[in-house]
Image (tube, rainbow, N blue to C red):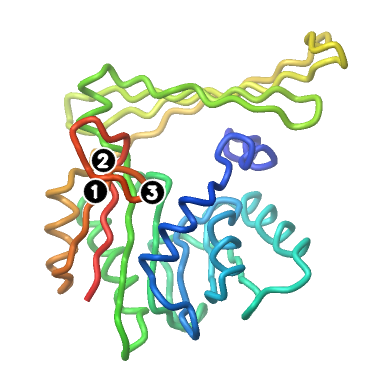
Amino acid sequence: MNLYDALSPYYDVVFPVKRPVVDFLANQFGHPEGKVLLDAACGTGGHALGLAERNFSLVGIDLHPHMIEQARYKAAQIKTFPGKRPRFEVMDMEAIHPDRLGRWDGVYCVGNSLPHLLEVERIRATLQTWERGMNEHGDHRIIIQVVHFAKVLREGGQLPTLEGKAGEAHIRFERRYEPEPSGTIRFLTNLSIEQQKADGTAAEDAVQNWTAETRLLPLSPDDLETMLTSLGYRNLQWYGDLTGKPLTESSPAVVVSAGK
């Protein structure tokens, strides 16, 4: 079992969906009536479900089957939606095609997912694929969130440890970025799951650990602006997180909302 398969049952503990984030996304995409959104790299579908509950039509895709299983399970627990029930598919975000998914009116990709593609040309081609899947009529909008790499590396590369509890399990997720001479970033992660007794102490032989190392491309605002303007997007709005705070040197993320 790899780290992301191990993480999937606890994903919502480590990365809980926050209402202000859903508010921000909903406000960016505007009136939901008849509007289809694509959640690229949706994880366990929390944001997609939140938007579906606000009458958007959602299609969520993720490369990891265990994540999609969790998303489908959560969707099944919700009896009714204002509009269509959200749909979740196992799919590579580089290989999305409207013949399989239908067309959409907007795309969002959060969770620092695009830098995993590692090459500017792959990212540009992926954005072109998403653009080709847009409905021909109406406004188009793409929202992208990545880590504010300049800030993280300036401060040493260590991200805050994420912790939470799920039943009797204590979850700890550690993340660190290290620059490489090639210009890419080593993304080092460690997931620790500790089964605890009722008194809060660790059960015997109950700690499991998974580590992973991934290379990332440290996308900058300039990179994103160049790629999006090449696709015809002109109205680019920049934020420092997914609640709409201004982008500054100390912002934890770079978020761009691009419309045309």
Residue that appears at 53% across and 51% down? 19
Q: Residue furthest right?
A: 198
Q: Are marks 2 and 1 in contact (CB under 8 Å)?
A: yes
Query: Any mark on residue 170, and which?
Result: none
Mark 3 closeness class: few <14, some 14–19, many ≥20 residues within 10 Å: many
> Dot 3: what SS?
loop
Residue highlighted by disc 1 = 119
Taking the image as shown, residue 72 lies to the left or right of residue 77, namely left
Decide which of tag 3 and tag 2 comes sooner along the chain.
2
Dot in front, 3 or 1: 3
Residue that appears at 61% across and 71% down? 87
The image position of residue 239, as x and y in percent, is 26, 49
Residue that appears at 52% across and 74% down? 56
Instruction: Work out how far the residue at label 3 is from the one at label 2, CA to CA, in angstroms.
Output: 21 Å
Residue highlighted by disc 3 = 242
The image position of residue 165, as x and y in percent, is 70, 28
Q: Is residue 105 above or below residue 223?
A: below
Q: Is residue 60 above or below residue 67?
A: below
Dot in front, 3 or 2: 3
